[in-house]
Amino acid sequence: MIGYLRGRLHLVTPEGILLETGGIGWLVRTVTNRSWPAPGTEIAVYTQLVVREDAMELYGFTRPEELHLFTLLRGVNGIGPRGALQILGAAKPEQLSRAIAAGDSAFLTALPGIGAKKAQRLLLELKDAVLKSGLVDGTETEAIPAGGGDNDEALAALLALGYSREEIGPILARVRQELGNAAPTTAVLQAVLKTLGRGGGD
């Protein structure tokens, strides 16, 4: 795994940069609106190699926080590496982390390629990870409730994802009974989604 590259900036292209290290030119995909120094300048990028059936692509970022968020975003269903790169090109890591931690769906839906359903999925799948990662500072974390803990909040999120009340009602009630009333809303939602992924949890 190539996690870090330091070398001479050879060329900036619409798709990324060409970075020369030891006589080898690496094509590194980066956010499109990044400002780069003049060609010939030595730079460093934090990278992640993405292997697909038809290609291997190297994605690079100037900050480790960007790379971490890129990895988290790629783990969300429906967001590929290029989609994650597009999101990071539209929001700074601090802004995106705060929005996810605070449950700010309005901020997320304003980003390219994110509709209401995808915003809800981002919040469901990444909120805990962002809070635990240190991407938001302590004061911001303290201001965010640890979990709603009620069926209405979980139900609203699931309805926003496109599930019907009839489909999720019994599963939600059973999960709540299994986890207890004090369970955070995020944990309840994850359990419900996991059950739905198994085909209803019979």
Image (cartoon, rainbow, N blue to C red):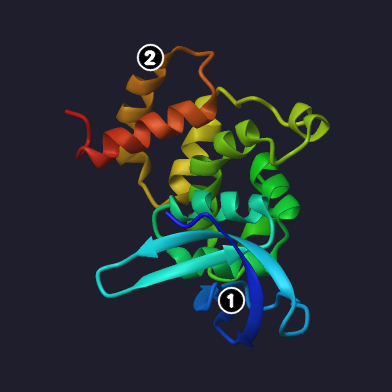
Could you say whether the residue bearing mark 2 is in a helix, strand or loop? Answer: helix
Q: Residue at x 53, y 28 (%)?
A: 185
**Which amino acid type is shown beneath numbered disc 1?**
Leu
Give left or right: position of 166 versus 138.
Answer: left
In this rendering, the answer to whether 190 lies above or below 63 is: above
Q: Which mark is residue 73?
A: none
Q: Residue at x 50, y 75 (%)?
A: 26
| Horizontal and vertical percent position of residue 150 | 54, 24
Furthest residue in direction right, as rendered: 139
Give left or right: position of 149 versus 159.
Answer: right
Q: Which residue is drawn at 64% across and 25% down?
A: 146
Task: Return the residue at label 1.
Answer: 19
Which quadrant of the structure image shows residue 17? bottom right
Circle 2/circle 1 CB separation < 8 Å: no
- Where the N terminus falls, by quadrant? bottom left
Which quadrant of the structure image shows residue 145? top right
Q: 24 or 31, which is in the foreground?
A: 24
Kindly tell me whether residue 110 is visible in this rendering.
Answer: no
- Where the C terminus falls, by quadrant? top left
| Horizontal and vertical percent position of residue 76 | 44, 51
Neighbour tally class for label 1: few under 14, some 14-19, many 20 plus, Cα within 10 Å: many
Q: Which mark is residue 177?
A: 2
Q: 172 or 108, which is in the foreground?
A: 108
Which quadrant of the structure image shows residue 199? top left
Closer to viewer: mark 2 or mark 1: 1
Q: 16 or 135, which is in the foreground?
A: 16
| Horizontal and vertical percent position of residue 49 | 43, 61
